[in-house]
Image: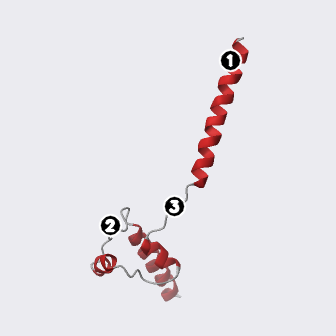
Amino acid sequence: MKAMKMLVAIGCMIALLAGSARSAEKQEKKLTCCEKAAATDKECKHKCCLTAHKDDKSCEKCNPNKEDLKIKKKKDQQTNKTAGK
């Protein structure tokens, strides 16, 4: 009887873990407006982003995790590499 309860408990845990793994795969990261623009090699056209970028800052409204500054650093690194050659 103990073995049966243990197998059922292990089966339930595996099912829960498999379900959470599937849901994690389904969740896709939504791109910010600046990331979408960078993907097409353009600048973001939102007024709030434009004013923030002029001051070398991140737009808090559109990029709460400062994703636009990360994009800018990558572009700067790429241009420095090509300019050095």
What kind of element bears circle 1? helix
Q: CA distance from mark 3 to mark 2?
A: 17 Å
Is residue 31 or residue 75 the one in the foreground? 31
Left-right relation of 76 to 56: right
From this view, report whether residue 59 is shown above or below residue 11: below
Q: Residue at x 52, y 86 (%)?
A: 82
Q: Residue at x 50, y 80 (%)?
A: 78
Identify which amino acid the numbered label 3 is placed on. Lys
The residue under label 3 is 29
The residue under label 2 is 61
Q: Specify the color scheme.
A: secondary structure
Q: Pick whichever of labels 3 and 2 is earlier in the sequence.
A: 3
Q: CA distance from mark 2 to mark 1?
A: 51 Å
Left-right relation of 6 to 50: right
Q: Residues within 10 Å of mark 1 (few under 14, many from 20)?
A: few
What kind of element bears circle 3? loop
**Residue 53: image x %, image y %?**
32, 78
Is residue 55 or residue 5 the one in the foreground? 5
The residue under label 1 is 5
Quick one: quadrant of the N terminus?
top right
Q: Pick whichever of labels 3 and 1 is earlier in the sequence.
A: 1
**Residue 30: image x %, image y %?**
49, 64
Q: Pick whichever of labels 2 and 1 is earlier in the sequence.
A: 1
Q: Residue at x 69, y 29 (%)?
A: 11
Identify which amino acid the numbered label 2 is placed on. Lys
Q: Residue at x 38, y 82 (%)?
A: 45
Is residue 73 or residue 58 the one in the foreground? 58
